[in-house]
Every structure is written in C-alpha cells, then in structure tokens.
Image (cartoon, rainbow, N blue to C red):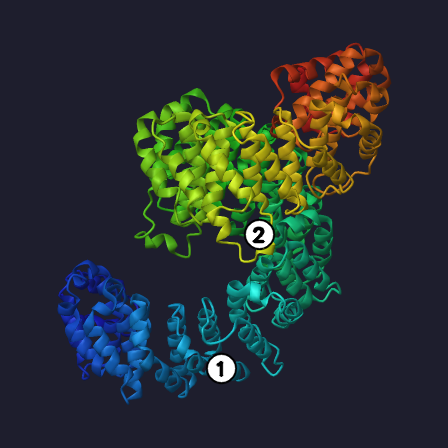
Amino acid sequence: MSNLIELYASLNGNTDVNEITNNIITKYSDPMAINEITAILASREIPEYIRKSAAVGLKLLIKMQKDIYINDPNSAFSNLLQVLMTETDEYIGQNISNALVPIFDGYGEEWGGVTQVINQLVTSENLQSAVVGTHLLINFLPTTRIEYVAQMQQIIIPLIPKLLSVNTNTALLGFQLFSAVQLRDFPANELNLPYTQIFDQMLNIFHQSLISEDPNSGPFADCIAKSLKKSIPFDSPVNSFQKILSIASDTNIPIEERHLPMFPIKSLVKTYGKELKQLLPSAISLFLNISASQFVGTGYEDEDNSRTVINLFQKFAEVFDGDMFYNMIMGMVSRDGNPAASFASMCAIYGSDELTEQYENNIQDIMNYIFAVITIPNPSVIEICMKTLCELAYLLPDAISPYANNILKIAFQLLGSAPQSSVLIESIHLIATIFQEVDLNPTLVVGQLSALKGAFIQAPYDQLKGEIMSAIASGIYACRDDISNYAHEFVDIVGSGLDSKEPSLYISSVEALGNLMCFAKQQILDLFNQGIQLLLEKSNDPDMNLRHVCILSLVNLVNEQSSVPEDVKGFIPLVLTIAISAIGINTLSEEDIYSDSQNTSPLDIILVGFKLLKAVLKNYPSECELFARAFPKIFSDFVPYVDSNIAKQATSASVYYIMNIQPDDNSILDFYYRAIAEQKKLKRCKNCFKAYSKLLAAQCPLAIARLGQFLECAIAAVSRNLPCQKSKCVDEDERFSFDPEFMEIIYTIICDSFKVSIEIIPAAQFIQIFSSLLSKVGKAESLEILGTLGDYVSAGGSVSPEIIQYALGKLQEIDYKNGPDAVYFIRVIIKMQPNLVSPLIPNLLPFFLGQLTSEVSSNQYYWATMTNVIAALFDLAKSPTLGSSVNMTQVIPLILSKWPIQGDYDEAEFVYSSLLQYFQANTNEIGTNLELLFTVLIRTLSLKNKTFAKFNLTDDTTSNLVNFTKTLMNGKPDILNAIPQILENDQIKVEKIKQRLGLQ
C-alpha cells in the first residue's frame, strides 16, 4: 500500500476518491501513523496541499486511536507539539489544535507540554505564530480549571486587543478568545475595566463590519452572543443591551445585515430578562421593523434573516406575564396587508410558544388575524400562516376544532392552485396535521380523502404523490373504524405506492396500509397478512424512515386490540423484540443515518420504540413476562434520558410496567420520588408526577403505599417549594405564575388522593393551605383550586362560608375562557352541604337558567360549562332539601337544547343516567319533549366510537339509552324516517345509529 504522502497527493484533482479514502482510513488503523503525519507536517519542503491534508486527517486518526493516545500523550504528540512551535500556517495550526481537543478533554493543563507551547506561541512577536497559538488556546481553555484561566489573564488581556487591531479575519480570533474566556464564567472583578474596554472595541468592530458588509459580521455576532450567555463582569446587562440596541437602530447598516444584532440581544434577554424587562417593550417595534426589512418574499425557507425574530420573541415571551406580552404583540401586528410587515407579525405569533394559554383564551382573535393574513398573495406569508396553524393544531386541538373546516378549505384551495411547490407541500402538511390532531367528523374527512385521491392521481411526480399519500394515511387514521365502508376506494393507490421505487411514496404507502389494517381489516383481507409480514420485516430496516413508519404502524395495531385477529397475537413476542431493538439502537456510530436522505434520526427510532413497548405492556402484559428482567435496566437508563421527548415516553411506558407487571421492587417509584423531591429538572419532575398520577388514578397498590410521600411533594408544588420550581423563580412577584400542564397534574394527584383518604393531610392544614393560595394565584389556577376543593367536599370534607362566597364571585366572572370549576364546586355544595346554599338558591337558579339560554360561544370552555350547569340542575332536582326549588318541567327543554354534551366528559355518566331517570319517572313529559329528546338521543348514539368512548358510560347506561331510544321509535315510523334528516344525511352517522340500535 502507498504511504500517506502518496495517498494525500492522489486526492488532489481525483474525482474517484472512495478507494483512496478507504486506503487512508486503513493506514489510520495503525496508531503509529501519527509518526508519518507528524513527519509530513514537520517538512516545509512537502507541498502545502499535502501538509494541509495531513492536518485535516489528524483529527480522524486521533478519533480512531484516542484510547491508545490518551494513555501517554507526551509520547504520542511530543514531536507534533514541536512542529506547532514553529508553525505559521493558520489553516494547518487550526486543524492541528482542533484535532487535539479529545486529548485536551482528558488532561487539561496537566498536559504540561501543551501549556508551554501555548505560552511561547501567543507571546511571540511573530503574528502568524500568535494566531496559531490563539487557535490552540481557544480549544484548550474549555478543558482547564478556572485557576488556569486566572493565571492566563496576564497573557490574554494584552493578546485580544493585539488580535483585534490587525484585520477583521484576525480580529475574529480575538472575538473567539474573548467568548471562550467568558464562557468559563471567570469572576474577573479586578479586570472589569480592561474587559470593558475590550468589549467596547469589539462592539465598534462589529458595528463597522455591519456597515461595510464584512463577511465576518455574522461570526462576530455569534461570538458576542456567546459572551453574553453567562455572567458578564465587563459590563452591566442594561448597558450592554443599550449599546447593542443602538447598533441595531443604525439605519446606515445595509438591510441584509440589520438582523445580526438580534443574536446577542437574544442571549442577553435569555440570561438577564428580569433586569431588562423595562427596556423590552419599546424594542419590540424596532425588531418587527428589522424583521420586515429582511423580507425576501420568495418562500419561507428563504427568509432566514427575517425569521431571526422568532427565537428572539420566544425569549421575550419568557420574561413577561403572558397576558401582557400577548397584548403588546397583538397591539403591534400589521393589519394593512403589507407582505413584509405581515410576515414579521406572523413571526412574532409563531415564535411565542409561551403564549399558548393566551392563544387559547383569545383563539377567535388569533384565527381571524391569521385568516386575514393568509389571503395576502405571497408564498412566504402563506407558508408561515400555515406553519402557525399547524403549531396551533398541535398545541390547542380543541380550541382549533371550530375552525378546522375553514382551515381545510383554505389548504385545499392552495393545494389546487398554488404555483410554488413549497406552498403546495405546506398545504399538504397542514391538511395532514389537522387530520392528526383535531377530532373531526368522519364524513368531512372521507370527503377530503376523496379530493386527496384525485390530487394523488393527478400529481406529476412521485415525490409529490408521497406527500399526498402521507396526508391520506393521516386521514384514514382520523376516520378510524368509520373508514371501513370506504377503504376499498384507496386500496388501488396504496397498492401502486407499495410497488413504487420512490422511497417517500413507498414509505407513506406503508403508513396508509398500516392504518387500513388497523381499522378496515375485513375490507382488505388480501392485503392484511401481507401487511403483517411487511411490518414485522421492515421494522428493522436500515432505512430509518421506513423503520419508523413500520414500528408506528405496529404501535397502532397493538393499541387497536379489536383489529388484531387471534393468529396475529402470536407475533406479540416478536413485536416486543422489535421494540427493545429500537430502544437499543446505537445513536453514536451509525453516521449514515444522518445523511440528507434520512429525515428520521436514531432518537426518533428510540422514541417510537418506547411507544411500541408501552402499547405491548398496556395491552398484552402477559406476553412480557419473559422480558421482565430487562425492563428495570431499560427504564433506569431512559427515564432520566437527556432527550426530553424520549424521557417522557420512557416514563409513560414505565407506568404500565409497574401497573401490569407489578414488580417486587420500588426502584422506579424511588426514581420518580427523587426526581420530584430533589432534582431541579422541571420536565423530568413533570414526567414523574404525571406517571405517578396515572398509577394513583388506577389505584395501583405500589402507588397507594407511597401516597404520603408523593402527596407531600404535591403540596410543596402548589406552594412552589419544589427544587425545580425554586430554580426557575427569578422574581418573587412571579412565584405563583401558572404552568397549566404541570399544575393540572399536581391538582389531579391531590384530588385522586381523596379517593384513598381525605385524612392524610389534616383538615385544618388542608383548608389553610388552599385558602391562602386563592389570594396569591391567578384566575386559571384559582379555578383549579375550586375544583380541588369540590372534590374534597365530595369526599366528605368541609369548607368555610368564605370559600363558598369566593366561588359565587367566580360564577359572575364566567367568560368560557377558563374551566367550569366554580360551577362544579357550587354543584358539589348543593349535593353535599345543601343547607349552606339553601339561602342562595333564588340567585343561583337565574344564573343556571341564564347559562342554558346563552348564545353559543366559540371559547374553549363553553360546552364544559354547560355540562356542569346541567349536572348542577340535576343534583338540585334530586336534593331532598332543595329539590322543590326548581321546576324541572320548565328546565328540561333548556337542558336538551345544549346536548349532546361536548365538554367535560367526566360528567357524561351522571347527566345521561339522570336524564333517563327523569323521563322514566315523568313519562307524561315525553310527548311534550319528544322531538328534542329524540334528536338528542339520535345525535348521541350516532357519535363516532372515539368520541362516544370519551363519555365512559356504564354498560347499563348505554343499554338504557339504546332501549329508551327504541321505545320512542316503537310504532312511530315518522320518527324512524326522520333520522337521516336529524343527522343531516350524514351516511356515516346514519350507519352508526343503525349499528348501535341494531336496525341493520
């Protein structure tokens, strides 16, 4: 084999380098190759391009032989360090220093040979030597102790200005060295003045580079941003903010450069938001204008500069009270139809994830704004509107639901008319997202699927067909078992996709096939067995995209037990093996899976592997016993995993391991407890609380045995005293800010604890804690507390008259933007402590009746409020003490006008059984209410299975609903014939009612 010089030389100008590269890698398999590379680098007579190839190759050699070299770096690299001492080529010196980083990590300044080389180079009068030494120092600093950083200050402080004063290329090294020092969080109190002067010099250079459009302006911005990530001993946050804001405001800066100051601003706001809070509102309009000035208008992906504001506003949103920032943003958005300003405004909306609660409470305003902006005929604007709609559908599916038809209409219009491929693809993604996230009427989806099939057939190329097929797969899943009568319409295109050589079309067709297998088995029997074999075989495919889709299809099949025939259940052990294999995928060495053709990463495979493991543990626990010994290690590795999505899914899977396998040890619960009680990671704490909440709700013995510990943590959480809460609290005034996702879990645990015992926390202490909280928390959480107190009273506890008065006050504030907990609380008092509310009935009744006659609102909690009002009226009517105060003959028509129930499904069993009991006891009122009553029953029994299952009705109540409906129909053909009209001739619903009533 040729030596390395010959191999490096043959790379020059050779178009077929694969064999040469393989030969080079073979040479690197010998640790002694370091001597050959060092000899090449030491010789100035060897052509420069060969020396540069050797410097680049050094990194791979050290990576391959690190375990050997790190045992004795002086022997391996002593000659190389001597080469560095005289090296003046910046490119070669930089690559050598980059290559040595893994060795630095192992030794730091204990590798004395390196410190000597650095000191000699950076203090050299020769600028080229100082530059090479600076590269080495920048890579070396992160691996050293803070004491070394302190010792080096006498060298670093004069070195940085020297580098800054040459040219912008060399100045960039000064910027990088400055940020490397600052990232060490060095407490240089006595060095404030020199560093302040250096920082001001850097800002001046940055400012001039923006004006002159220097190519280093972007790297300068990045270095300044890094320097501001931690404490800044060289300036105050306010001064730094004002200086950079002044630069950003300079209109002499060319348009293409004006977005760059936003990067250091973002770092400042992230770290020092509290100190800068008063300065930020006045800066919002400036950044919106800068974003608008960067607008290109040719497509979302081309708007890199304009989109810089997205991440900036995410940090702004973390600083302010949500309502305040929402009002600021919506008060400044463009409403004049200007594409550039509208795009910038949509960036602000799209980037403010912290405003989810405000978007939910103001969904009508947000949707009206987006619907107005999306009509602007510009691809960039249209795309960001669709991306925002996708995000809202994912975050707020229930709030988006009333707008789904309009969203789909817009998306299909764009699908049929958009000339730009990016808009076309985004419209397909939007359709798929609405199908995936929003609970839709199957008839609507079936109609849209037919339109998608037409688009699929007409699509001019297979990649576009693949995108459309993916949306079709989502639509099939959205219909669930209601697709069965229409499945035959898609078998042909799915079959053609499975024969395609285009990967994206083949993979999306596998996804569609998997969904048909779940919900239309009888209609695709010919494909079913073939599909099972395909999914099992391809779930270990090297193609990560295909592997992901196949495993996800298995997840759906395992979760849809009714769809899996008995002979397929024999494959469950193999499915479990697939899950464990996916979880164990190597995330480090499989570099090929990061190629451009792979959209799926190893982390995605691990994530879907845990989804499959969870599905098997949940639905087929007996099949898991042979693997039980492997589970504790899997969960101990992945419940605290660094990727938050995987950790969340692993924690969720561990619930079903504890619940259904019932292990003897408490190790996983111990981890839950430590993560909550001792650790500062909020997401991990949230995951573990949620897992425990599920176990407690299922009355798991292991969870009940630890209830005292976890309830103590829950009480600490409502008081904001957990470590993860204290670490996030930067301002005592904001201590009781509300994290709905987290706190709702906490209150659920407290409520479920009452089902075990209300005496774990002494009554006086419990009431004192929650009474004091009411004066500290915001509106949303105060309602959560009322709901918790309602459950407490329902379990036999008592509350003070003051709390009842507080709840009555909350009734007057109902706007359907927050939950119905105040109504629920009063309803529980009516049922459990009627004497306390007896004097209040004359005021409560008009309130309840006023709610039932209210105009339907699009706000999220309207229907949940109606359900709780109906439940309260039924409890009032049933009360031995208060029943005579309500005339149900007058109330029943109002109740029926608000059905079927569409919110707070927990109350469904009570209100439906109460309705049946009422008419069984008052048969004389059936005739008066027949038309409305029959309409309610038909609309309820025609609901799709997924929605009907949410009611969680007992078998008796379901049977009674069916029998009562049949009784009303008996001998009344006119009523029977009215069913299609009641259901607006929705054939899927007509078939569903026939199925449930046994009319087929």
Residue 191: which quarter of the image?
Answer: bottom left
Picture coordinates of residue 22, whole percent (x, y): 23, 61
Relative to residue 37, is residue 848 drawn left or right?
right
Residue 735 — which label? 2
Name the residue at 86% across, 23% down.
890
Q: Name the residue beneath numbered marker 1.
A: 200
Q: Disc 1 versus disc 2: distance between alpha carbons?
A: 36 Å
Mark 1 lies on a secondary structure that is helix
Height in image: 774 above or below 616?
below
- Left or right, 678 with respect to 155, comes to right
Secondary structure found at label 2: loop
Q: Please state which of residues 366 and 319 is positioned toward the viewer in this rendering.
A: 319
The answer to which of 733 and 813 lies nearer the viewer is 733
* Residue type beneath disc 1: Asp
Q: Position of residue 201 (x, y in %)?
A: 47, 84
**Amino acid on which the number 2 mark rests in the picture:** Arg
Specify whether 125 is left or right of 783. left
Residue 833, relative to residue 367: is it above or below? above
